[in-house]
Image (tube, rainbow, N blue to C red):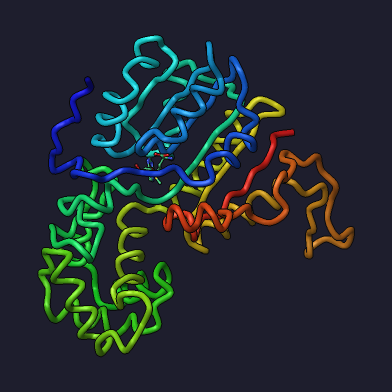
Amino acid sequence: MTVPPTPTPADPAGASHVPVLLAECLEGLAVGPGGRYIDGTLGGGGHTETILQKSAPDGQVLGLDADPAALRRVGERLAEPIAQGRLLLAHTAFERMAEVAAQHNFAPVDGILLDLGLSSFQLETPERGFAFTHDGPLDMRFDPTSGESASELLNWMDEVAIADIIYRYGEERMSRRIAKAIVEQRPIATTGQLAALVERAVGGRKGQRIHPATRTFQALRIAVNDELGQLERVLVQALALLKPGGRLAVISFHSLEDRIVKVWMREESRDYVPDPTSIYGGHDREPTLALLTKGPLVASPEEAARNPRSRSAKLRIAEKK
Ligand SMILES: C[S@@+](CC[C@H](N)C(=O)[O-])C[C@H]1O[C@@H](n2cnc3c(N)ncnc32)[C@H](O)[C@@H]1O
């Protein structure tokens, strides 16, 4: 009989993370026996576990996560492939992917996966401060051992900068009102305090489908973790780490991330670079990537019904030339 692990604050009872677009990722990454893969966003290890199964008996995964709690959990759950040397774990932000892969002598690789954003474990753990639905400290860091929490950030930034973050990363029209209320009422220490403040600032729920604080919480999370900057920096490294013919799969959950991936993949797959300042109009070049998805892959109606998280997921896949 297996004994269920004791729930701790970092591992709430009943929380589980269901990997999204799993079959599409495995097919897109062309996972097969003996392959080497990097999972830049290990999370609950759902994708990694299946990659290990599909690449058996001797395929390997290097799994990265900024969150020490995610690594601890996967370390326990996937102890066997770790003992076999098939799964290596590293506590790091994925913007250090190239450096960490070099440290582990883990390049070049056959495939790299990025499943961006936060896991259900993080969302459902009040102490992590990601959710307006649970009261907890306003933290929001993927890595609680480094950097500034959302509360710290809000407590020193000026009103214009706070409004900018909420507008740009949350696409929130009432960003100025919200920033004004934050500055008037700070220090803001808890998620509950911020959620209530935003709700009052925008004049209540007014029959909206989503909670009025949804966009503000998303914006702060993106800013606290420099999510867009991290993504821009890792794409270049991923390309360098892949073998020719190696695959990159990226799942994003909001339009700002997806746009970065889309534009970068498109640029890398072009065989011509326009130059408006030149009378020759640009130059030909060898593309570095081939696009395997013209538009993004999205969840099937069945997956969307089974796993609501998958509804906003967009998967783009490219192959290194
Ligand atoms: C959506 S979850 C991944 C879930 C995973 N694919 C699974 O099937 O269980 C995203 C994970 O990536 C981590 N993460 C997000 N941004 C990161 C970054 N810049 N560097 C490292 N880890 C990051 C988060 O801590 C979280 O655990």
How far across and down, in percent of the image, does residue 261 sit? 58, 52
- Residue found at x 49% / y 59%: 311
Point out the image quarter for the N terminus: top left
- Residue found at x 49% / y 60%: 312
Q: Quadrant of residue 10?
A: top left
How far across and down, in percent of the image, does residue 106 sit? 50, 19
Residue nearer the viewer, 229 or 308: 308
Judge whether 86 appears above or below 276 on screen.
above
Q: Quadrant of residue 140?
A: bottom left
Q: How many marks?
A: 0
Left/right placement of residue 44 relative to residue 297 reads: left
Left/right placement of residue 9 relative to residue 169 reads: left
Left/right placement of residue 84 relative to residue 74 reads: right
- Residue found at x 69% / y 36%: 319
Farthest residue, direction front: 1
How far across and down, in percent of the image, does residue 66 sit? 32, 39
Residue nearer the viewer, 101 or 309: 309
Point out the image quarter for the C terminus: top right
- Residue found at x 45% / y 30%: 48
Judge whether 9 appears above or below 132 on screen.
above
Quadrant of picture, ligand 1: top left
Residue nearer the viewer, 183 or 279: 183
How far across and down, in percent of the image, does residue 125 sit? 20, 50
Q: Quadrant of residue 213?
A: bottom left
